[in-house]
């Protein structure tokens, strides 16, 4: 059973669209466009969403500078203010305090010590350390090229502050014009060091570490001895006391450890604190997860709860803060609300037209919130992206190729809308980021264009097939007219000067009785092939075929000698072709053929009504040509033509056969037998035909009624030679 060619073509289009999508979507440019355009669409469709209330940003901004009477350059603020800020936050129960500010230089030693004392007293402060990239100059030459080495080095705050902090952590971000969509959780280039949001979450969850260690011990985790045995040991000041790196290494070394811990957590649902279980789940997902993350922004700048710096330092002890800081993660850093010239802003999907970007500290807080909620953006893995782009391209290409042309665009748009809706739901509910640019801006339009183009080519091929089929029945000009519209069927015919050539074959009736229908059809097709070819070669059109008879037409502006000569050559060629046909083996039957030719005005057009039309010539010329052809039988000739056909033509041998009153006609018509070409006729034949013409001059031929031949002539006193009844015979000029 052979496959459906339409399905094969549709599958080929689908495979092409799938390959085009994979080739474009998985390139660096395609991936960048997905971040710059596709991700923007998804965020805009989803809109802002609520951030976790336990994540807070304390903004160092121009408003606080004014309210506190400080320098407009926050880096010059006295560090005693930061000490007071930490004490206030600690008193209000902040779980972790993370500074996104670099304190790389000592300013006032007294203020530095006060700040360090406040950090040490709080016991939960994470300070920012700068990640500096240095290029080591080459000292060797290899293969003719100088080799250089890039080294990432951590630059901590001043020692007095670094020693007081519970942890130090970097948070590297690219500056504009690069759009920030992705952040590091663990900086592999700097020794897999945890970044600020990761470290803050680790400190935030310190009260739950005893439970985590117990879970690890219960499932028999390997290398557990490298971890501290309790929360107190895990919370010692200084980076050495935090086992975050060890936990990360532990989970990476055992790919199944994450699932084991989570399964153990699910078993403990009946007892314990639900919030602790959720927090431990977030920790385990962070330890065992990727080294980087796509940020799931909550909205435009300040979507994370933001409190101006001066609010915390209100001198009125009874002043209430707009949010509860108890148990919150507080990030302190530069964050302007109305100043687009902020120095710590980063270009993101939510950067505003005014120029205001999202601050670095808010990006850190957003990353922390994503980790806490376990809702970072999930980009499909390579295998999943290949499957999505491949299946989408295969599906839309296959379907569009099967559709009629008028619906291709509509279905492509509808399918794209459905895909966009599915991508939106996945993004909104699961933070799952499906590609948009490649499927919607590349594959869908390409599939529509390909399907339309292929459909157009199919239509053109179908038109050519139809034209070719109609060409077997109609002249090329008529086919062209019909191709432009069916109005040509009902339009008025064309009155023109025309030449009609009628043929008829002898013995056809007898053959039709002797041969089977299939054999007769095969024989007649061969016969028509022989007589049609000279007509087509001479520029004529076969107008009608009935049984063994053919009517051919030549249309001309006037009685042009060249056209009439071409018709005569065609008639002689038909005689030769029939003779060859009758001699060709195997000889089943012979079909001697007679021809009649006449010219004059004819009407050419479509004749018919309702749902059936035929293209034919109408007029007296057509009937007369048929009558002339029939006269051959009585005269024993092959080709008879009216005088109007042969008048003024050179190169042909003909002889007049007289003037005849044809059946159904009121006026006699002078006819000639077309004998052959002058070049193919010898001198004796030409002389004979000339004498024949002299002998026949002054006579007229009369068609006698059936059964009245001999008696009619004798009663009229006309000379009687050798004739048969029911035939055409000569009578003297002047007639009876």
Image: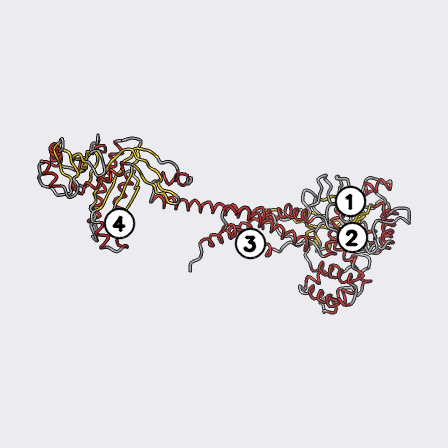
Residue 55, label in figure: 2
The alpha-carbon separation of the residues under discs 3 and 4 comes to: 57 Å
The alpha-carbon separation of the residues under discs 1 and 2 comes to: 15 Å
Mark 1 or mark 2, which has the lower sequence index? 2
Mark 2 or mark 4, which has the lower sequence index? 2
Any part of residue 234 in sight = yes
State if disc 3 and disc 1 touch (CB < 8 Å): no
State if disc 4 and disc 2 touch (CB < 8 Å): no
The alpha-carbon separation of the residues under discs 2 and 4 comes to: 95 Å
Residue 302: x percent and y percent?
76, 46
Mark 1 element type: loop
Mark 1 or mark 3, which has the lower sequence index? 1
Mark 4 element type: helix
**Image quadrant of residue 274?**
bottom right
Q: Which residue occupies the foreground of this view, 568 or 705?
A: 705
Mark 3 element type: helix
Any part of residue 697 in sight = no
């Amino acid at each position: 059973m052979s496959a459906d060619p339409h399905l094969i073509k549709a599958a080929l289009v689908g495979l092409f669209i799938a390959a085009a999508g994979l080739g474009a979507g998985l390139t660096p440019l395609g991936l960048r466009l997905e971040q710059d355009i596709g991700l923007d669409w998804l965020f805009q469709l989803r809109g802002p969403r609520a951030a976790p209330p336990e994540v807070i940003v304390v903004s160092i901004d121009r408003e606080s500078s004014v309210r506190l009477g400080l320098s407009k350059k926050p880096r010059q603020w006295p560090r005693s203010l930061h000490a007071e800020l930490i004490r206030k936050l600690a008193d209000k129960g902040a779980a972790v305090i993370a500074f996104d500010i670099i304190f790389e230089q000592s300013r006032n030693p007294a203020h530095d010590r006060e700040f360090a004392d406040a950090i040490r007293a709080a016991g939960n402060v994470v300070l920012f350390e700068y990640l500096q990239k240095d290029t080591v100059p080459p000292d060797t030459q290899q293969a003719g090229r100088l080799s250089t080495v890039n080294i990432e080095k951590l630059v901590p705050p001043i020692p007095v502050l670094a020693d007081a902090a519970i942890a130090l952590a970097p948070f590297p971000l690219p500056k504009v014009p690069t759009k920030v969509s992705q952040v590091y959780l663990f900086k592999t280039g700097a020794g897999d060091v945890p970044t600020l949001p990761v470290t803050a979450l680790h400190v935030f969850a310190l009260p739950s570490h005893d439970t985590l260690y117990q879970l690890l011990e219960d499932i028999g985790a390997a290398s557990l001895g490298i971890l501290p045995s309790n929360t107190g040991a895990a919370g010692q000041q200084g980076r050495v006391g935090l086992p975050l790196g060890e936990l990360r290494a532990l989970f990476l070394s055992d790919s199944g450890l994450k699932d084991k811990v989570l399964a153990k957590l699910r078993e403990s649902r009946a007892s314990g604190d639900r919030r602790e279980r959720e927090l431990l789940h977030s920790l385990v997902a962070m330890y065992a997860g990727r080294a980087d993350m796509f940020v799931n922004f909550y909205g435009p700048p300040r979507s994370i709860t933001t409190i101006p710096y001066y609010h915390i330092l209100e001198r009125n002890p009874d002043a209430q803060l707009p949010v509860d800081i108890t148990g919150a993660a507080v990030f302190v850093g530069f964050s302007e609300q109305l100043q687009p010239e902020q120095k710590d802003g980063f270009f993101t999907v939510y950067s505003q037209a005014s120029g205001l970007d999202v601050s670095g500290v808010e990006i850190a807080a957003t990353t922390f919130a994503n980790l806490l909620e376990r809702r970072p953006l999930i980009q499909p893995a390579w295998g999943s992206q290949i499957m999505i782009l491949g299946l989408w391209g295969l599906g839309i290409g296959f379907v569009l190729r099967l559709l009629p042309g008028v619906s291709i665009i509509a279905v492509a748009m509808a399918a794209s809308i459905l895909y966009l809706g599915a991508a939106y739901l996945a993004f909104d509910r699961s933070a799952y980021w499906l590609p948009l640019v490649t499927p919607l801006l590349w594959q869908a339009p390409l599939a529509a264009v390909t399907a339309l183009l292929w459909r157009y080519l199919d239509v053109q091929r179908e038109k050519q097939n139809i034209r070719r089929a109609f060409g077997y029945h109609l002249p090329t000009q008529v086919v062209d007219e019909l191709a432009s519209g069916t109005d040509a069927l009902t339009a008025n015919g064309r009155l023109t000067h025309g030449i009609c050539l009628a043929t008829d074959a002898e013995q056809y009736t007898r053959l039709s009785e002797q041969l089977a229908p299939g054999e007769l059809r095969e024989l007649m097709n061969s016969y028509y092939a022989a007589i049609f070819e000279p007509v087509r070669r001479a520029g004529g059109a076969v107008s009608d075929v009935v049984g063994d008879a053919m009517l051919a037409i030549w249309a001309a502006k006037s009685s042009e000698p060249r056209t009439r000569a071409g018709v005569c050559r065609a008639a002689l060629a038909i005689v030769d072709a029939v003779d060859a046909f009758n001699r060709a083996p195997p000889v089943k039957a012979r079909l001697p053929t007679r021809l009649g030719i006449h010219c004059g005005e004819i009407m050419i057009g479509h004749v018919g009504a309702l749902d059936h039309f035929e293209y034919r010539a109408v007029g007296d010329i057509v009937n007369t040509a048929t009558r002339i052809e029939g006269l051959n039988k009585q005269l024993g000739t092959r080709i008879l033509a009216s005088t109007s056909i042969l008048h003024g033509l050179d190169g042909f041998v003909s002889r007049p056969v007289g003037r005849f009153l044809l059946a159904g006609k009121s006026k006699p018509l002078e006819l000639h037998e077309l004998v052959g070409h002058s070049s193919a006729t010898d001198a004796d034949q030409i002389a004979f035909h000339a004498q024949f013409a002299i002998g026949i001059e002054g006579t007229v031929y009369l068609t006698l009624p059936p059964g009245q031949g001999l008696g009619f002539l004798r009663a009229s006193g006309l000379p009687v030679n050798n004739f048969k009844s029911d035939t055409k015979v000569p009578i003297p000029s002047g007639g009876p």
